[in-house]
Amino acid sequence: MTPRLTGTTLFAYAALGLPLGAAALPMYVHLPNLYGGTLGMNLAVLGLVLLSARMADAFIDPLIGALNDRFRCPRAMIATGMVLLIAGVLLAFNPPHSGGRGGADLWLWLASALVPIYLGYSLASVSYLAWGSLLGSTQHERTRVSAAREGFGLAGVVLASVLPTVVAAQVDEGLARFSVMFAIAAAVCATITLAGAPLPSGPATAHPPAVRAMLAPFSNVAFRKLFGVFMLNGIASALPATLVLFFVADALQLPAEGGFFLAVYFIAGAASLPVWVAVSRRIGKPAAWLAAMLASVVAFAGAFALGAGDLASFTAVCALSGLALGADLALPPAMLADAIRDAGHEERAGAYFGAWTFATKLNLALAAGVALPLLALLGYRPGDPSTVQPLYYAYCLLPCALKLAAACALLKINACAASPRGVPT
């Protein structure tokens, strides 16, 4: 049975998106800059730590999805995950300074903090996404659920991008204070969702063994097609997310404006969500997503021409790429929810989203674990603008190539522009 979708229930469900969004941005944007820039950790070592932690994290998501389907206790999994996530964030952004800049104990502290962060985030987010895919009785309602969740997520991202620079003059002190504010907000929002959002009800079903359950989504042709596009588009988005603060500091030489640029990007993304919901209803989700991919290519190609002091031009780049971000966040999960419901696989929603979040995290792991050591190998040194050329190729041009590849893959999905249903069968 699908619960009735009201404004109150939609708000209650979406509230948890705020702390999950607020946690994601510091992990993938602020954390590399904090440990690699401010604290002086060697980039190759930092990349290895992040790659190892993120790869391990990615591979547990399908298992968590299968467990979610088997035990059907999303509230318990989300509550446990949020406790772990809060503890890990407090550890990660309050590192010891006794070892000096880049001290040998720093990588060990970071690795220890990443374990509860990634495990907690996985437990909470996989169960949360699977829960949302079962809300709404029509495809348009499922798009509304996705857009509301991502809207709250983007609100959290904007707060995470601005608050660390507002509450303190120094980056490390700002992130430490932000971690305390995050802990409070996460507890409040989790309580709202767990107490107020409805859970779908239905008869218990038999589940295959865990390995078969994890692989079950790939029997769905629509999911396989969508998954390939999502992987290509995801790595294209993960590269700029990992490198943006390095680009702002060394290519544009505007380090103090990093929070402003992030705010423009994410506010534009949030503002575009209702537009993409309307556009997708008119021309179909795949066609709307394709338009967003092409807008991203235009934005990042333009960034390649920028240099020191180009504040206004890079603000325009952030605004245009942020508008495209709204589609990247709202449409693919809604298309996945359509694929699940069209195939009658509601009882496997956790397995689907376990595979989905695995792809997301694998992309982010590769972006940090490959891009940062490669940049170091090519001679880029944070804080040295004379070594910035490799950063231009990694931040601007490589994402454009990957976005175009994703667009070509999306065009091959049957009836891309003709069907408003989102995913062909």
Image: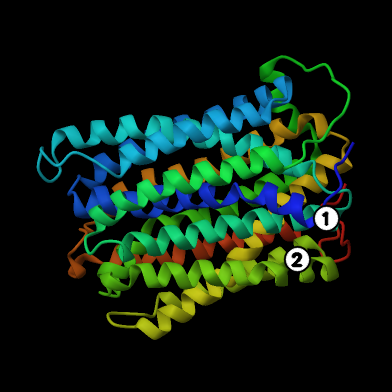
Q: Which residue is mark 1?
A: 141
Q: Nearer the viewer, mark 1 or mark 2?
A: 1
Answer left or right for 45 relative to 18. Answer: left
At label 1, the amino acid type is: Glu
Q: Which mark is residue 277?
A: 2
**Rendered location of residue 285, percent (x, y):** 77, 61
| Way the structure is coloured | rainbow
Q: Is residue 309 above or below residue 63?
A: below
Q: Is residue 251 above or below residue 37?
A: below
Q: Is residue 395 above or below residue 341?
A: below
User: Can I make out residue 336 in this image?
Assistant: yes
**Residue beneath the point at 45% across and 69% down:** 263
Q: Nearer the viewer, residue 77 or 364?
A: 77
Q: Secondary structure at mark 1?
A: helix
Q: Earlier in the sequence, mark 1 or mark 2?
A: 1
Q: Which mark is residue 326?
A: none
User: How many C-alpha atoms fall within 10 Å of the one at disc 1: few (<14), some, or many (≥20)?
Assistant: some
**Residue beneath the point at 63% across and 56% down:** 150
Quarter holding the N terminus?
top right
Answer left or right for 334 relative to 354. Answer: right
Which quadrant would residue 254 be assigned to in this image? Answer: bottom left
**Residue beneath the point at 40% across and 75% down:** 304
**Rendered location of residue 32, percent (x, y):** 32, 50
At label 2, the amino acid type is: Val
Which quadrant would residue 71 be assigned to in this image? Answer: top right
User: How many C-alpha atoms fall within 10 Å of the one at disc 2: few (<14), some, or many (≥20)?
Assistant: many
**Rendered location of residue 404, percent (x, y):** 60, 64
**Residue beneath the point at 17% across and 49% down:** 40
**Rendered location of residue 376, percent (x, y):** 24, 52
